[in-house]
């Protein structure tokens, strides 16, 4: 089916019960509509997931990009990764500071570097060399996203938030992208699952995934590749594959969620936290955007 496409987005698996996330749900719905139009016109899945994540980063609505909080040293360190399923080329940055769009830097790593991941000062230098937009006044740029208070930031409780996108384009290619400001109260230099290819992000010819949650547990559970291999090697359905990994995260004591699209255009979104801000649309399914609706 030449015109088959699918797109799923997440705005993090850290929402708090009782909070109103209607603004983020509307934003995700609007993004999904725009992404759908891009896919319909033949734009590549790689370009679409980068655009979707970049828009979430600059919105200030999520714990990524503009909505990120400082670490215990008072610095905002950001992580992002992106992967092209057709080639399995990937790019990532970790602990990068004061760039408008970490995912755009990660895409530049994929396209313009022999590396897969660049970190810290090296990532900042690379972004400058590539002419990518930086932040002149960090103290004035960053904001608290919806549902996050200063008290949350001051508590060392590993509350988390991340954004991500997965897509299948009409050419049959899959891609995934993920970006985060990390957990609240994190120490300087802490890196979670988001920039690690195969853990926070994965895409190949069969499946694309983006994770959100307490990264330490996702790393220990094998992350996105645990789900991908469940789907490709163990005969899991797409949804079963996601729960294969999430159940292991829960067994280890963590929580979070993930989204996935396969080569058939099927979409699955799963979480074991209180909720996950998410939206999805495909050539065979209507747009949905929600936060707390059960997924199992």
Image (cartoon, helix red, strand yellow):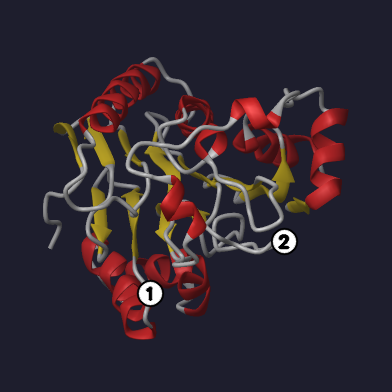
State the residue lying farthest toward the bottom.
Answer: 251
> In the figure, is residue 270 to the left or right of 84?
left
Residue 171: image x %, image y %?
42, 31
Q: Nearer the viewer, residue 98 or 219?
A: 98
Give the structural element (helix, strand or loop) at label 1.
loop
Q: Residues within 10 Å of mark 1 (few under 14, many from 20)?
A: many
Residue 114 in sight? no
At x 55% / y 60%, what residue is drawn?
185
Q: Position of residue 69 (x, y in %)?
A: 55, 45
> On the picture, is 65 further left or further right than 174?
right
Q: Residue 49: in sight, yes or no?
A: yes
Q: Which mark is residue 88?
A: none
Q: Which mark is residue 254?
A: 1
Q: Quadrant of residue 252?
A: bottom left
Identify the image quadrant of the N terminus: top left
Q: Secondary structure at mark 2?
A: loop
Report the residue marked by disc 2.
189
Structural distance between the alpha carbons of marks 2 and 1: 21 Å
**Image quadrant for the C terminus?**
bottom left
Seen at 61% across and 26% down, the residue is 141
- Mark 2 burial class by Cα count in 10 Å: few <14, some 14-19, many 20+: some
**Which of the pair 67/31 is nearer the observer?**
67
Residue pictured at 29% horizontal, 77% vertical: 247
Q: Nearer the viewer, residue 137 or 167?
A: 137
Q: Is residue 137 left or right of residue 213?
A: right
């Amino acid at each position: 089916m030449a015109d088959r496409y699918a797109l799923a987005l997440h705005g993090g698996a850290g929402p708090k019960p009782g909070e109103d996330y209607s603004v983020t749900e509307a934003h995700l719905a609007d993004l999904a509509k725009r992404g759908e139009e891009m896919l319909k016109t033949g734009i590549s899945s790689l370009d679409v997931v980068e655009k979707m994540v970049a828009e979430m980063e600059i919105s200030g609505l999520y714990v990524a990009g503009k909505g990120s909080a400082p670490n215990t040293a008072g610095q905002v360190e950001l992580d992002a990764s992106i992967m092209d399923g057709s080639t399995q080329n990937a790019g990532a940055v970790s602990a990068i500071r004061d760039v408008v769009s970490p995912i755009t830097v990660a895409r530049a790593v994929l396209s313009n570097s022999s590396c897969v991941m660049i970190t810290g000062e090296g990532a900042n230098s690379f972004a400058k060399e590539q002419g990518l937009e930086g932040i002149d006044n960090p103290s004035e740029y960053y904001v608290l996203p919806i549902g996050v208070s200063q008290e949350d930031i001051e508590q060392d409780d590993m509350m988390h938030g991340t954004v991500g996108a997965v897509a299948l384009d009409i050419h049959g290619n899959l891609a995934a992208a993920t970006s985060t400001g990390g957990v609240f109260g994190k120490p300087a230099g802490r890196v979670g699952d988001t920039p690690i290819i195969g853990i926070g992000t994965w895409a190949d010819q069969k499946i694309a995934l983006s994770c959100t949650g307490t990264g330490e547990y996702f790393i220990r559970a094998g992350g996105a590749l645990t789900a991908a291999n469940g789907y490709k090697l163990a005969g899991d359905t797409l949804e079963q594959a996601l729960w294969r990994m999430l159940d292991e995260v829960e067994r280890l004591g963590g929580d979070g969620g993930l989204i996935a699209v396969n080569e058939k255009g099927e979409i699955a979104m799963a979480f074991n936290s209180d909720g996950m801000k998410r939206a999805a649309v495909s050539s065979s399914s209507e747009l949905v955007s929600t936060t707390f609706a059960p997924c199992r």
